[in-house]
Image (cartoon, coloured by chain):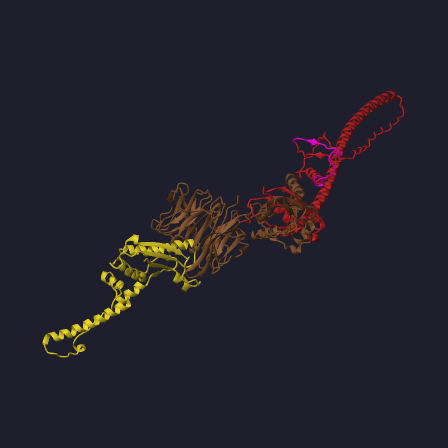
Chain colours: A yellow, B brown, C red
Amino acid sequence: MKFIKGVVVGLAVVWLAGCATNDQMGTSGESVIVDVTESEMVETLPLLDPAVQAVLDTGMVEASAEQIAELLEKDSIHFPYDSDRLDDEDIAVLDVQAAYLTSPAGINEKLVIEGHTDERGTRTYNLALGERRAMAVKNYLVLKGVVSSRIEVVSYGFETPINTMHNETAWSENRRAVVVKEG
Amino acid sequence: MMLTGARVIRTLLLLKKPSVMWSLLFCLLMGPALAQAELTIEITKGNDKAIPVAVVPFAWSGSDLLQEEIAGIIGSDLRLSGQFAPISSKQFLGFPSKADEVFFGDWRLLGASYVLIGRVSEQSGNGYVVNYELFDVLGRRSVLRGEVTGSRDQLRAMAHKISDDVYENITGIPGVFSTRIVYVVAKRHDAKKTDYQLVYADMDGHRAVPILKSNKPILAPSWSPDGKKLAYVSFEAGRPAIYIQELASGERERVTNFPGLNSAPKWSPNGKKLAMVLSKDGNPEIYVLDLASRQLTQVTRHFALDNEPAWMPDGKSLVFTSNRGGSAQLYEVELASGETKRLSFDGKFNARARVFPDGKSMAFIHKGEGEASYNVAIQEMDTGRIRTLTSSPFEDAPDVSPNGRMLIYAAQGDSGVLGIISADGRVSFRLPSSEGDVREPAWSPYRK
Amino acid sequence: MIGKRTRSKRGGKKRESVKGEGWLLPATVSLLLHSLAVALLLLIVPTTETRKVNPVPRHVSAKMVTLERPEPAPKKPVPVAEKPAPKPIAKPRPDQQAIALKQKQAEERKKKQAEERRREERRKADLRRESERKLAEQREHERLERERRERKQKRLEQLQKQQEEEMLAALDRDAQAAEQAREDAELAAGYVGIIRQLVERQWIRPASARQGMKTVLRIQLLPTGELIKVRILAGSGNEAFDRSAYQSVERAAPFTELQDMEPRVFEENFRTLRFVFNPEDLLE
């Protein structure tokens, strides 16, 4: 994938450079060598991840490509203690996800949203809390246009923590909903 | 008083009023006579420490070694109940196995309130007969005599039966030493691989046997009232689902197949229904499934999280956890009317209730105001009074013994262990831990 | 020995019931006897100071008061009749026979008159004497009565005083005894407290014990504090509970603390004891 990108970029650069000089040649008939940097602005356009591109193309998200790329990387939403509330950061992430999933590039993708909690409380309570967190994410995505049947929700409660320590850091890491794309 | 009385009399004499003097003198002189009634002492409180009991090693007439030490098992049972303090046999002056060998004075000297003696003999046809007798040392008399028979591999069970008998004779309530427990053991190999087992054992943790093995989580086991089946949550199908397993045959049935959450199954006291939590309608709510007709009835309808149903002994209402009030608290819903009332008001987290067999109190996980730990607490239903029983940082899954005298719970940690505590909180034990992280215990009903 | 007499007021009903000697049971209940005696004496005490003298002798008399026999009335000296004065003898004269006869007749008449007079006077004197005698007799009688009554009253007062003093002495004794009894009771209460604590410390309630259960025991102790016997007077209906009750007493015994007690207090209060086991501190 990266090799192809490199080739495309390289060709683009070459092609753009060729355009500039060709124009210059075509107008006067004389062969005059013009210093490009002095008289014209040159813009380089990096090659975008198609996902990022797809998001940009929907126009649903106002952010730079970099930002979008970063947000797309995030597959986990984190939650406060005993809560299934989504904050602005979470919304930003989900907006990007929703944009992608409703774009032509992502329209057929299915996902599973896993709900997780920290170890405090009871296992059965946490199973339900994880469910609520996952559902909060799903509901937002559905609100943003993603078809409900594409999204499955599974809660693991405290059964599969990513950090097995018994401190605040571990706990905050474990309180999450994870968007898992199938296929 | 008497002196002034004499003065009064003297004055009255001068006044010469015989009728008054007559009665006064009568009282005066009869008073001491009346006070001659028997002294009565009222005893209104006590000192409920463990009853000292001597369990004498049972005599064995066979040639080979008995594979179980019966007196040892009985002593452990009695100690586990929290109500008895078995005396070490090293202190015994003698080892009677017959009634005429029991000298009350000796046992009185040791401080024993009771002595249990017994004899094991082989029964024709590959079995044992155990005879036992319990003596009230202070009353100097025999109070219980019995006999149990069983096959060779039933020695532990016979010992537990004797423990039940002794316990009931002394305390007046049935013992639970012949009951069973189930629990989940998790063995984590790495971040991606953990093995889970549902284990079935004697209530003292012995004779543990796995009845389900899985590489996906198992939780929330619940006993049927006849003790023959278990309902539990398993992730084996990729999401939490409720299964019922018949212990004797190992046969299983997946009871619910709804998307989302299927959790916290709880058998009704009459064995005909299963309460559970489902999120199929968009939010975790409580439902009751009729096992015969498989008809599902929705019990709670609230946008908040409703979870962890527990039956009241009359089967007419459920205690459950809800955060409809802003934090996890306990509520009660009457099934017929749907009327709901809040039960817990103390602290920011109250969940996973279990109602005692007499319906008068409930055990649950409680985080007190300003506290950091999650502990087992008991709340009286009528007064709302709470007592916290335990004190490790993260406790979970309390369950109550069928005689309402003991609780089992999980003390979480990297290697979680099970704890047993007496309902009055005085005595607690850790059960011998198996390998791995032990959690999610459930106490069987009385074995029929 | 002692009869019973109810107080009777002037003009009121008179009632009497007499209990002869030996009718009362020997004083097993000495207190009853004592009280009866004193009450009896009480009742003899009159209500008022002023008493009407009853000239009419009571026709009802109790046997209890032994009155002396009335003294014989002193004999009054009978006035001796005066001897008539001797008649003067006169000489006889010639014509003087008639004169003398006349004089004699006159003298005889005089004599007769004098005699008449004398007889009259005698009669009068006799009457006078008689009436005087009667008056004197009456006065004497009254005097005797009065004296008798006075003596009786004095005796009664003496008796009364004596009885009062005895009663007050008895009251004092009783007061002392009561004082003693009070001290004993305090002492006994102290030991009761000790015993209660000892038993409570040893009372282990079984799991089936509930508030409202009640067992009553009776125990017998020796002065050493040793337990001779325990008996269940009333059970609670829960055998385990009853057993826990008597076991607590067995464990607490021997109550050696009782050895410090005065034997009298022990005998009166601690030979047998009643226990009521009725828990107030159970959670349910």
C187 or A81: which is nearer to us?
A: A81
Residue B173 drawn at (x, y percent): 56, 45
Name the quadrant containing residue A152.
bottom left
**Of B194 and B336, the residue lying toward us:** B194
- Residue C24 falls inside the magenta stretch: yes
Residue at figure coordinates x 57%, y 51% from the top left:
B77
Instruction: Please name the residue shown 41% across and 58% down the image.
Output: A160
Quadrant of the image containing the C terminus of chain A: bottom left
* Image: C61 above or below C102: below
Region rendered in magenta: C11-32
**Residue A11 visible to the viewer:** yes
- Residue closer to the observer: B418 or B208: B208
Left or right, residue B434 beside residue B68? left
In reply to whether residue B395 is colored magenta, the answer given is no
- The percent position of residue C40, horizontal first and vertical second, equals 70, 38
Q: Is residue A137 left or right of residue B53?
A: left
Examine the rendered structure and indicate whether residue B389 appears above or below residue A52: above
